[in-house]
Image: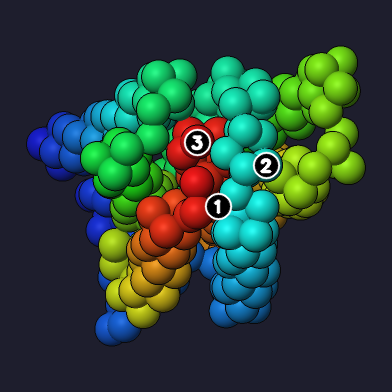
Amino acid sequence: MQAPLARQEDLCIAPCRQAAGGHRPGSMAVWVFIYAELFEFGLFFLAFLVAKWHFPQEFHQGPMQLNTLTGFINTLVLLSSSFFVAQAMRTIKRGETYLCVRWLCLAVAAGVGYCVIKAWEYQWNESMGIHSRTNYFFATYYYLTFNHLLHVMIGTCTLLLVTGMTLLGFFSADDHEGLEGAASYWHMIDLVWILIFPLVYVLR
Amino acid sequence: MWARLVNKSLQNQADTRLRQAWLKLLGLTWLSFLVAESGHLTPLVLVLVLGVTVVKGRWVIDEFMGLKQSLGTRWIVSLYFYLMTAVIGLGMLWSPV
């Protein structure tokens, strides 16, 4: 049997079905939700910087008390999870359902790993006598990172759901918009963390 | 047979590119971590770290999210990312301490 010729989306790394205005991965509703989330995090970043302006000493000393290693490891975990999700999208477009499920399972595992490491980081903070009420820096740190953690939890549950749906045959090479939406949401979470990592852990 | 070979070759190229993007992202994160551990924030370090952040965001948007072909969405997400990076940079630069 002759293999089908490579389609346009197979030649690209990620979903890129070429249409007149270009292909947006996921439905419009998902993207409205993603834009709202990005706006929300944008406000958090501004709040962080305003607080830094008002309490410069606390924001100068605070980051030095944080566990940078956990922030670093979590960045690696999230970037890897995004890679797994991108691979899952590539495989579903090729009709390789079981391979797609495997990549999605890896992404879910990375999401759970992120939550475990973050929980350990919070516990480590507690053992060092750091709480959300220690000072304004830690209040904004917990506000920002806990909010992001909640989004990772929601994203992980969503990935788990689409993994099950993929396994049950809900998505195929021709119809996978729901999976694309979940993937886009997950990448958005990763993108926000790429900004949080230097803001909280690196630039001190 | 030729079609299958071409197909496989193109898929491998794309897979390799994606894997390379992932490894580069991990490498850049490691660079940021080293900067964080050095503990000296100078304007040059700030520009370096934010430059690394912009490159990382660019790769996630283009390679992982696959927005290269979706011009409108790519434009909005990229604008947000650049704007936030610039705001963070200015916030750090003009911080009283």
Q: Position of residue A170 (x, y in %)?
A: 69, 54
Q: Where is residue A81 in the image (x, y as percent from the top left)?
A: 55, 34
> Which residue in the protein does label 1 denote?
A192
Q: Calculate the distance from the C-alpha at mark 3 to the C-alpha at mark 2.
A: 11 Å
Is residue B8 shown above or below A127?
below
Q: Residue drawn 76% across and 48% down?
A: A136
Instruction: Determine which quarter of the picture holds residue A38.
Output: bottom right
Q: Position of residue A116 (x, y in %)?
A: 78, 24
Q: For residue A58, which numbered disc appears in the image?
A: 2
Q: Position of residue A108 (x, y in %)?
A: 69, 33
Label 3 and label 1 in one chain: yes
| Sequence-earlier tag: 3 or 2 | 2
In what element is the residue under mark 1?
Answer: helix
- Chain under numbered label 1: A
- The label nearer to you, 2 versus 1, is 2
The disc labelled 2 sits on which kind of residue? Answer: Glu
Q: For residue A179, which numbered disc appears in the image?
A: none
> Which residue in the protein does label 3 denote?
A204
